[in-house]
Amino acid sequence: MVLSQDKLRNICIIAHVDHGKTTLVDFLLRQAGTFQQHQVVSDRVMDSGDLERERGITILAKNTSVRVGDTKINIVDTPGHADFGGEVERIMGMVEGALLLVDAAEGPLPQTRFVLQKALKQGLKVILVINKVDRPDARTEEVVNHAFDLFVDLGATEEQADFSIIYACARQGWCTLNPDELPELLAGTKKGSLQPLFDEVLKQIPAPKIGDEEGLQLLISNLSYSEYVGRLGIGKIRSGRVKKNQRLIRRGITESGQPKNESFTVTQLYTYDGLKQVEVNELLAGDIGVIAGSENAEIGDTLVSSDAQEALPRIDVEKPTLGMIFSVNTSPLSGKEGEAIQSRKLRDRLLKEVRQNVALRMEETATNDQFRLLGRGELQFAILIEQIRREGFEFMVGKPTVLYKTDESGQRMEPMERAVLDLPQFAVGDVTNMFQSRKGLLTKYEGDAGNGSGRIRLEFEIPTRGLLGMRSRYLTATRGEGLFSTILLGYGPHKGDLSHRTSGSLISDRTGDTIEYGLMSLEDRGILFFGPGVPVYEGMIIGEHSKENDLNVNPCKEKKLTNIRSAHAEVLVTLSGVRKMSLEQCIEWIDEDEWIEITPKSIRLRKKVLNQNLRSVKRSERID
């Protein structure tokens, strides 16, 4: 059934990580009758990727829809982490309104600010949803005031600042517009549902805006793929209509940025019905549709129905702030645990990712088997590395580097970020010293995080390079109880030199398998990264040295046997412990002269120069 424009609503949901966004979408789908009564539905249905479920975060923007009466509401679930800002920016043009979801205890946090700023800039109508009102430390009134201050701070218009407020408990599936009803709903003496939220969306969010063009105009904001019909372009139809088997023109650009047009025939049309893509014969302006037929479709391309129509402005994304080198695996263990891909295959895989993620860029390097990927943050790189690794590939990555700029006067500029820390009171001194040593400037101190919980909220303005390697140190200082989130502020004057890692590496000087006897003799030299029975090679890093310089060691050393009997039984001695390094910890830890070797089964650290007689162990000589 083809719906008219006034029977459509397009909204996105804005929320910080772990504020209940995906849970709310689950209950919206359930209460709108999207699922059959006998249908078995898992929790967090919108987090479809393995990594999203494992990490409990939304990485990719996804579409779904619900029907309320005869009106269809298209819902786009947006990532809450600033590292995936490209996902946020490209879907903002698909919607006319947004639900701003805020935790009733934590209030608006940096990623909330980041996405809300984009929404207000697009002129979207926003509804505030205070979630988790059942928390014992909820401070609902304060959070509403903080949200209003945030709207004003971000330059909201009077109409945008006059937002509706809904109080919700997403995990129990109810909400209300009246805060006086909360005690009864929380006590369970009154039954609630999400109907007030549906009603408010229909009342407050305007119907889609239709362009003046008579013919079709559709900006591709997302891509998908079908085994049956090939590449799928997803976007909101700005004007006109499109039918199956219609001839369209794709207005795109080449790799060099030159305009390129392609004519193709629409082979299939789909729209969203719940979580499913439903085949239709026609789509009208205002709806979010899926078009098959062009194998070369890219995010940012415009689909038009005649030569006279111009392309819509391409999706504008803030430029990357970090770069990372991806390289073919050249280690002696290459090909033992996965597919040792050639440079062409690595290049094609990275290009595929760049085409689907507008926040990423790729650059060629002087070395044929190395490619430089530019992105937003360490987490974004870690997710991509994990995805490629799970596809069975082997490769290597280098240390993330900050992208600098030069202003008109020739002054060197670097990206600056706002770090918001929510931490226990006992750790404030250590954390403040830690951030100030990395050129951080304390801009805000909020005692007890405003709720008498014994926690403090700090805000620092700090260079992006000062944050590299800080996350694990921060969690150690706060005994795992600290919350840490960042948001890009822009570029500022260069803050001077920063030390990264003050310790050197313990490096294997030969190839073989590690032996417990050899590792025990190295325990007093530093911290080991793994135990016995692990294959190593010359130049592979096996631990962190306790001193500044590197140290070449023999982890394969065996105990010499003699024909003399011992006068007493030997005491059983084992390793005191090793530090298991995760991918994120490796990214934070490595220096410029080191690689992370990634395979489907292992993550190894190694020197770029493997032969010990060709590299220096002195830090001053190996790090510029």
Image (spheres, rainbow, N blue to C red):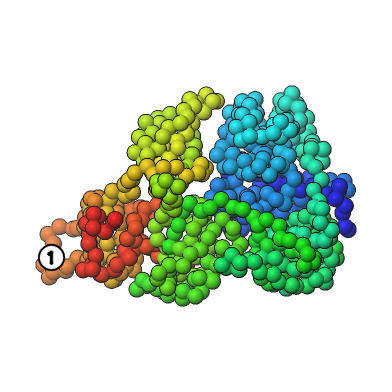
User: Which quadrant is home to the N terminus?
Assistant: bottom right
In the displayed structure, 211 sits above or below 163; it is below
* Residue 589 visible in this rendered orientation of the protein: yes
In the displayed structure, 457 sits above or below 274; it is above
In the image: residue 60, left or right of residue 96:
left
- Seen at 88% across and 52% down, the residue is 4
* Residue 466 visible in this rendered orientation of the protein: no
Of residues 56 and 59, the one drawn nearer to the viewer in this rendering: 59
In the image: residue 4, left or right of residue 585:
right
Residue 479 image position (x, y, % from top left) = 41, 39
Mark 1 surroundings within 10 Å by alpha-carbon count, few (fewer than 14), some (14 through 19), many (20 or more): few
Q: Quadrant of residue 397?
A: bottom left
- Seen at 57% across and 68% down, the residue is 255
User: Which quadrant is home to the C terminus?
Assistant: bottom left
Mark 1: secondary structure: loop
- Seen at 66% across and 60% down, the residue is 300
Residue corresponding to mark 1: 565
Q: Quadrant of residue 116?
A: top right
